[in-house]
Amino acid sequence: MSIIKHIWDYLDHHVCTCTLLPHNIELWDVLVEEWSNIKQEYITKLFKSMPDHVQALLKAKGGHTKY
């Protein structure tokens, strides 16, 4: 239940859409570039969604949720 999972998914998607997949040092450079391209609005949206995540988790009594 962490927004970082969504951030990693975002980065994975953007790195995998590169024409040539980067390797080793190139991968680090691409990750740093993509990280800096994440819009603050996206992070804010994820942060603001946390109360809904918590409510769904409580309702499911710790079980599976749609998140």
Image: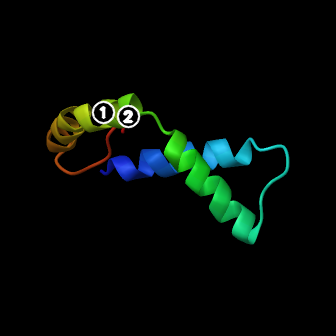
Vertical position of residue 23 compared to residue 10: above or below? below
Color style of the picture: rainbow
Give the farthest residue toward the bottom: 24
Rendering quarter of residue 41? top left
Kindly indicate whether the residue at mark 2 contacts the one at mark 1 (C-beta within 8 angstroms): yes
> Quarter of the image containing the C terminus?
top left
Disc 2 packing (10 Å; few <14; some 14–19; many ≥20): few
Vertical position of residue 42 compared to residue 60: above or below? above
Rendering quarter of residue 39? top left
Between the residue at mark 1 and the residue at mark 2, the CA separation in whole angstroms equals: 6 Å
Disc 1 packing (10 Å; few <14; some 14–19; many ≥20): few
Left or right: 65 with respect to 52?
A: right
Left or right: 53 with respect to 36?
A: left
* Location of residue 17 in the rendering, given as x and y in whole percent from the top left corner: 74, 41
Residue occupying image coordinates x 17% and y 35%: 51
Query: What residue is pinned by disc 2?
Result: 40
* Location of residue 47 in the rendering, given as x and y in whole percent from the top left corner: 27, 38
Q: Nearer the viewer, residue 65 or 23?
A: 23
Vertical position of residue 18 compared to residue 45: above or below? below
Mark 2, secondary structure of its residue: helix
Vertical position of residue 56 compared to residue 9: above or below? above
* Location of residue 27 in the rendering, given as x and y in whole percent from the top left corner: 69, 62
Left or right: 18 with respect to 32?
A: right
Query: What residue is pinned by disc 1?
Result: 44
